[in-house]
Image (spheres, rainbow, N blue to C red):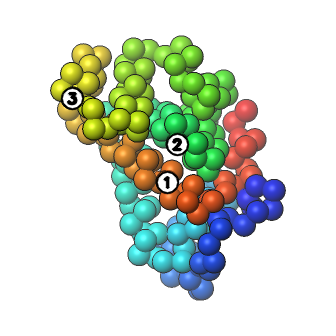
Amino acid sequence: MSVKGKPIHALDLPPVDPLPPETQRYFDICVEKLGFVPNVLQAYAFDITKLNGFTTLYNDLMLGPSGLSKLEREMIAVVVSSINHCFYCLSAHGAAVRQLSGDPALGEVLVMNYRAADLPARQKAMLDFAVMMTEQSHKIEEQHRQALRDVGFTDRDIWDIASVAGFFNMSNRVSSAIDKQPNIEYHSQYR
């Protein structure tokens, strides 16, 4: 289900029917764990190769081994999506921040203005870097990477911050371009 009964997105790209067995299993796991299949996955289901590419990269960046916690990666997703005004990602990843932090207010303040949040210096520096990447990536210099090192991030962590921010900049733009709608369930989760 999407917001106010709108279709999942504005393009006429029906899903492959039937879905390949491994894709159907993946969707079944989503239903088992989340109670629904996220619309972002349904949107990609018209092309299984594109769906697999998206999910492989997403799962690696957001769930794979990293010096960044899952919460920190979701925080980056929300802050980048806030700058890009991506309704889908703000809804979906705002819910994830609420879930992982156990703090409904944190999800909201990150959506509105992360600078108003009471964050440790490490997380503020991480989000500052993600914002700079989103707004002015061509101005990033060694001093900006050093600022991350100064609060305890390794070079591998900096790679992960940049990769997560880059992924959501791409995903936000695709979501906005096709008017991708968030699942209605996201709006009430973990409040």
* First of labels 1, 2 by sequence position: 2
Of all residues shown, which one is farthest toward the right? Answer: 4
Q: Is residue 126 above or below residue 58?
A: above
Three-letter residue code for mark 1 = Arg
First-in-chain label (3 vs 1): 3
Please give the residue where the numbered disc 3 appears in the rendered image: 141
Determine the residue positioned at 43% across, 53% down.
170
Give the residue type at disc 2: Asn
Q: Do the residues bearing badges 3 and 2 touch, measured as CB atoms within 8 Å?
A: no
Residue under the image location 58 percent in, 42 percent down: 85
Residue 178 visible in image:
yes
Which numbered circle lies on residue 84? 2
- Residue 98: which numbered mark, if any? none
User: Between 154 and 114, which is closer to the camera in this rendering?
Assistant: 114
Examine the rendering and report whether any part of residue 28 can be seen: no
Q: Is residue 28 above or below residue 95?
A: below
Alpha-carbon distance for marks 1 and 2?
Answer: 8 Å
| Numbered disc 1: secondary structure | helix
Residue hosting label 1? 173
Up-down relation of residue 179 to residue 165 (above or below): below
